Amino acid sequence: MARITKRALAATAGIVMLSTTLAACGGDEGDNGDGPGGTAGKGGTLYVKAEDAIEHLDPHRTYIGLHINMLARTVTRGLLTQSTTDDPAPIPDIATDTGTMAAGGKEWSFTIRDDVKWEDGEAVTCEDFRYGYSRNFATDVITGGPSFYPLSFTDIPGAAEGAPEYSGPYTEKGQDLYDKAVTCDGNTITYRFNKSWPDFNLAVAALHFAAPYRADQDKGDKSNLEIFSNGPYKLEGEWDKESGGTLVQNENYGADDTGTRKALPDKIVFQLGDKAETTYEEIIADAGPAKTTISFNRLPASMFSQIGNEIPEDRYLNVASPFIDYLWFNTEKLDPALRQALAVSTDREAWINASGGERSYKIADSIINPNVPGYAPNSVWKDVPPSGDADQAKTILEDAGIDTPVKVSLQYPQSEGADKQAAALQDSWNSSGLFEVELKPEGDVYYTNIQKPDHDYEIGWAGWGADWNSPSTVLPPLFDSRANIQGGSLGQDYGKYRGDEFNKKLDEASIAAGAGDDAARDKAYQEGGHDPRQRRGLLPARERAVQLRLGLGC
Amino acid sequence: MTEFSLTKSGSGEDAFLSVRDLKVHFPTQDGIVKATDGLSFSLERGKTLGIVGESGSGKSVSSSAILGLHSGSNAKISGEIILDGEDLLSLSEEEMRQRRGKDVAMIFQDPLSAMHPYYTVGNQIAEAYRVHNDVTKAAAKARAVEMLARVGIPQPDRRVDDYPHQFSGGMRQRAMIAMGLINDPGLLIADEPTTALDVTVQAQILDLLQDLQREFNSAVIIITHDLGVVAEMADDVLVMYAGRAVEYGPCKEILTHPEMPYTWGLLSSVPEVTGDTDAPLIPIPGNPPSLLNPPSGCAFHPRCPHRDKVADDLCKTELPELLPGGRGPGHTKRCHLANPDEIYQTEVLAEIAPDLVKES
Amino acid sequence: MLAYLVRRLFAGVILLLVMTLVVFMLFFASPVDPVQFSCGRNCSPELKKQTEKALGYDKPAVVQWKDFVQGIAVGRDYPDDPELRAAAPELVTECNAPCFGYSTFNTKTVNEEIAETFPISLSLAIVALIIWLTGGVLLGVTAALTKGSILDRGLVGASLILYAFPTFFIGLFALKFIAIKWGLWDKPVYTPIAEGGIGEWLYHLLMPGAVLAAVFMAAYVRMTRAFVLESMTEDYIRTAKAKGVRPRIVLFKHTMRAALTPLVTMTGLDFAGLMGGAIITETVFNFNGLGKLAVDANKVYDLPTIIGLVVLLAAFVIIANIIVDVLYAVIDPRVRLG
């Protein structure tokens, strides 16, 4: 979680932006796919810049939303894909429809189109999908991706316990087990699970763990930065981890009815390593290639003041990310009343202002993103102003008989930005006179420490985003103590929350989803979600992203 | 040597080197440092002048002025330095350079630091030759070998390629002498040439210098604080104190009949190797004066044990002239004492060499 | 001489081995769990074990170190798991001796990483060296010769100011204003000689090279000035003057030779350090040299790359030390090797 959190927070910004530009680059003047308003033109070169290297191009090893989206629009097609708009419904891509669920969510089937081709002109087959999915099991080679899901769900002995007896296509140990679990019947692929996976369709639309892969192209780890495309672009020459690569039009691009790949630029050149600030300086200077450059990184907060001046208002786009930043409380150390008092007295506005203001974040009232089904605002926040309510906190503490001021400490991974945010939180709590907050910044070791079952941290910082459009990728991974707290690790349950009621609701929701009863599922999630948020007094803030629009003419 | 053969100041017409009223002043932020203040002496070919004094008395500064080594510094030099009929102070920097090492050469106190550590001895000697003679490197080197042989370096053709650090102290000084004499200069200035050497080596070096002087018929100025060296080498002696000559005369005269308390002090502080080992060594009390703020009157008066013998505090108020005392015109001294020779014989000598007094 | 070199090199190799062992120990003693870090979200204990194996961190540190040393001696094949190699030969990466390891983060052998990044760091170091050495020595000598003048004070003052500016500040300024805002110079992008010829190569290296050189030049101006002034007061300089040697020769032959000798040592060691990568300059200008590689490797706890770079940098410094010592013996006859 550690790594993903840190990285993803910085990288999510471009998801929708990139979808938009890659899908409709050229003349789309509307924001966020609001509809083409200009003269869409084909041709030209689009430059994509990013500060950090892209760790994986191998579809089964990508787990960063931005990269998945980028690859999905250019070179990696799957069974289903996501819309470039806010519409959460999955769109059939290489599959003929959005799939058929059977056996209460324990079985999913898709039919593969026969007119989609690899870049060498050969058709994408059912076997390619079956081979691709099998790569997830080679956990000592195919690392970094969301293989957690196929590993634990697929109906292979041992999978439910986290140690499937199949070890992937390289050693082929337990191959017969896999051959029974995932089958091809003509053009139809069927996945069998050991438990209900009712939103498998959402998962394959959002992630690439089920993407097809050609066995003859597979060199394991050596394929990590290789691209064998079935999309509108293909890699020209080699990809260099540090500096990037160039995508050109793929003439063998097969049929595509998704409408998500306009593929207007002739070339997409990835240039990695420049600092975001440098890239934005270039974009502002607007000379040469910078005219058709976009950045994977957010506009640095220090440059916000240039919006409306050097940066024309209509040249940047502010896009919501699926990520939520939150503070967690150690439920073993802090009394429920104390947690609630801390929660209501938090000046969330100051917290946001300390990190770039509303161009970076906005206040969230749930750990679940409003776009995700099952979202409901947390009643804790109903009567709390954004700047906090010290009086209410005082009453709570008095009623509980807690002497003030209460000494508590806030732990966080140290960085320049995090220091400012932590100081703002400290101020907001201390100014009420109810608390004496001590700040305890740490290095990267923070991420290791908060997963230790015996940690004695009191308040900490964390972030999370749904893997796909369902609370099942938010509430269970964060708060299901049965899944999280095991094997010497807290998983993501840093606050050591254990709630049997809550766990029961998660099970209810899962059963309802398996039965196809969406209303019952959402209701169970809402009820369950209410519980931990109420009891733990979570303090979410929703992240936004700022992105410069690219110049015209790409 | 009689007192009439003394080449004294003012008779510079026929002298090879004649220095008149030489002043070397260094302006500093705190005032003017008068390192040399009105020095006059003269020297004939084949003769040796010993300049004696404590460190800081202006010996080295004066000799450097003769070589024109103060150019490029902020020194203010006035007076006359007439070498072979030519006033060196009126020469241009380039003209002076052409005479340095050719007409006037100098050897220095510490031959290890005075030789460049990165060049061979032969290279450095040959360089001195090539600067003033248009010859090939090989010819210069041959000349260097020849000179090394002349100054008594064994196997000179091999040692010529050695570096200074590979030479012993005495050999280094021999090499320095070879370097100084390679152009057959009329005047050789040896600045403390034996100070850094063993006593036995000192004698060899002094012998060598004397031999070479005879051979080349050069005039030699030997700068030293060691009266032993002076006794052995010098024809004339010039005693310097605080930038001025305080006593000047033939060597024997000065050593046997000194007329200036400072000279007495120098003599008293030198051990006589052959003399009475019981004889006390009497250091001169106090420290050399500041050249920035020299004492009023006679610069030596704060340290002079005999100043009470002069009436009216004259030592404190009036600078004595450098004038002949009671021993004839060739022996001048800068002292107010009326009967210095008598005081020396009765008071000073009695203390440092009682035997000598008895005998006489 | 030969015996001396052999002895020094042998001692250097021992030192390197000890250093790598220390790095291995420190890496695994660090409170940050590198496996947890790479395992990512939804990391189950089983998955973590597999990740550990994939990263090659599953064996005890000493065994890993032994494998590393063995790899240097006789080469190594990756992935480490012999069963996997036998089952899927297409996965195998051969890493010939001296094999410094395989970075799972960069999907390359460390040897390949170094081969790709070293020329960039070396180019940068060479250009910077030329700039700072010529600039530093020329200006330092000028200052020494005009000691006390306005020029001298100006040079000393300017070098002090330059010395006080952090490299990243100068670098960002050059990049942001000179290259991007004012467009006076193209934004530097490393271009190998093979691609653009010497001209292109140099053009793109000048700005980062000058930025990198700035702080060194500032230091070298002051050092050169001090060394020249010091050696001008040496007795042997007076001797040379007393011989009647021309002032120009006194300066360039006698004074400089002595003054610049200590600079040889400084230059050798500084240059060796820079060959190991100029972290800040490379990061600011996005030059993928050893320095940037090191920064990136540290970010993700990429042990093989870190070890490889430690060995390389230490080897540079050790070799530079030996070269400087030998050179010193050549320059200064008083110095004997032994």
Image (spheres, coloured by chain):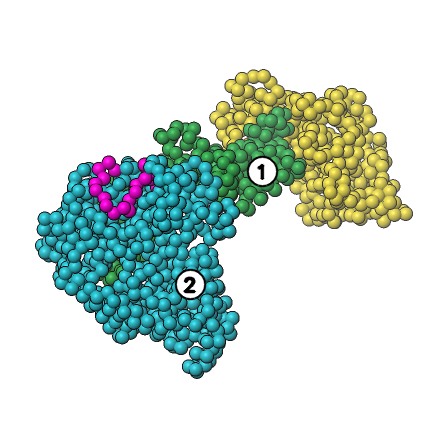
Chain colours: A cyan, B yellow, C green
Q: Which residue is mark 1?
A: C225
**Which chain does the residue under circle 1 lie in?**
C
Q: Which residue is mark 2?
A: A363
In the rendered structure, which amino acid carries the disc numbered 2? Ile
Q: Residue at x 79, y 24 (%)?
A: B12
Q: Which residues are magenta?
A: A250-278
Q: Residue at x 44, y 46 (%)?
A: A315
Residue C135 lies, with reference to residue A522, above or below; the image says above
Let me know if residue B312 appears in the view: yes
Residue B345 on image: x %, y %: 80, 42
In the rendered structure, which amino acid carries the disc numbered 1? Arg
Q: Of A264 and C272, which appears nearest the observer?
A: A264
Residue C306 on image: x %, y %: 34, 49
SS at badge 2: strand
Left or right: residue C335 compared with residue C32: right
Residue A372 on image: x %, y %: 31, 61
